[in-house]
Amino acid sequence: MDVIEKVKAAGIIGAGGAGFPTHVKLNSAPEFLIVNGAECEPLLRVDQQLGAMYAEELLETLETLRIMCGARKAMYGLKEKYHDAVDALNACVPKYPDVEIKMLRNTYPAGDEQVLVYETTGRVVPEGGIPIAVGAVVLNVETLYNISRAIRDVPVTEKFVTVGGAVKNPSTVKFPIGITIKEAIDYCGGPSVDGFAVIDGGPMMGKLTKPEMPITKTTKGLLVLPKDHSWIVAKGRDMGRMMRMAKISCCHCMLCTEVCPRNLLGHQLRPDKMMRLASYNTTAEKDASATEAFLCCECALCELGCVMGLQPWKLHQELKRRLGGLGIKNPHREAPKSARKFREFKLFPVQKLIRRVGMTAYDVPAPFRGAYEAAVKLVTLPLKQSLGAPSKPCVKEGDAVSKGDLVADIPEGALGSRLHSPIDGRVARLDDKSIAIETA
Ligand code: SF4
Ligand code: SF4
């Protein structure tokens, strides 16, 4: 079986959060293969530790993929401050003359695919485009780790997750996919506050979730915060209220646009104009259109740029949903030749970001504690964990399964990914949303 078939068989999807099926991504002929080790969301500690622990394995796999895809060069981008990973990777890289370690600054969102492609290759991905449009394929560190396992026929059944914030023992753990978020938090000592909320992901792009939800192939971080924490309150604010606030307080200062990473790359995304369009229904902005929302990566940096605490990203999210519902697609396809002139001076430092979101107290190490060792009684596998179609179950209730057995496949002719059992057990429940497997 070739590598792409093995990646497909192992059910690998982008582990950084996007969930794009990796076998599809690798089925291309890039000039550059880029590893995304930026881990730009503060408080997450997965990729930097994987880089330190598995440097040799990761670089060997990267070189295998580079040769397979025919890429001229492979690059591993990570921040200078990840000293252990930088040292481990630098020690191994001389063996691979076509692989380069690229140092990134401690700015947000250094791990946004388009920002990373620009920082490593100097090329700007066109509006509404993906990195292959400029000859690049980007893989997350954990995805690369999963590929190294897939080459040895090990499917994805576990997930590295940082459990941080207001927990007693912030840690990074390899959890079985499908256990609950509550079980993961309890494994890390439980919440250190009474009323708490949980963000699935980093503070910026992560979403509010519930303790009873399962860990999936895209869970990267679980951040526990007091439920009245200002950032939790802001995340939970509904769009209508935010837009009412915008009508009263948006002063059209353009600071949101000044910090916008996609605007800084030269894309015509102007959150200040979008806020004006939406809050006043104005026709003054003749050169602005609601479809600009399609260019937003929802990094939420505009919220930190805004002196009034407004949330243009939330407006964009809603617009994308509504326009998509009407069958309207992104019409913006400009391909800037270069980023904006003063981009370098407008990059947003992560330390400043951490202060602004009120998380300085939680910016602590979350060391890797190995694999989850508590007893697992039940796992729940959502059938939709990747982009594309939901996986199609190939087991029925009552079936006995072993760890690593295929339980759901890619529907014929569709984009999707496979699911495997994370435990030895029995299929306890099956519906159109998920498969539950309990220990026998
Ligand atoms: S979330 Fe805001 S800052 Fe980020 S890309 Fe969208 S508009 Fe720009
Ligand atoms: S930064 Fe805030 S106040 Fe200024 S234009 Fe943007 S949304 Fe309006």
Image (cartoon, rainbow, N blue to C red):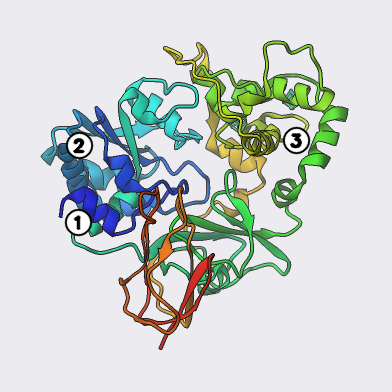
Who's the residue at 85% across and 28% down the image? 247
Left or right: 26 in relation to 91: right
Q: Quadrant of residue 120?
A: top left
Q: Residue 241, position in %: x, y?
A: 83, 41
> Does the closest atom of ligand 2 sit within 8 Å of the Cβ of label 3?
yes
Give the residue pinned by disc 3: 309
Image marks 2 and 3: residues in contact by CB distance under 8 Å: no
Q: Quadrant of the C terminus?
A: bottom left
Which amino acid type is shown beneath numbered disc 3? Gly
The one of 312 and 6 positioned closer to us in this rendering:
6
Q: Quadrant of the N terminus?
A: bottom left
Give the residue pinned by disc 2: 69
**Few, some or many C-alpha atoms within 10 Å of disc 3 (few <14, some 14-19, many ≥20)?**
some
Residue 375 appears in view: no
Q: Is residue 92 above or below residue 424?
A: above
Give the residue pinned by disc 1: 151
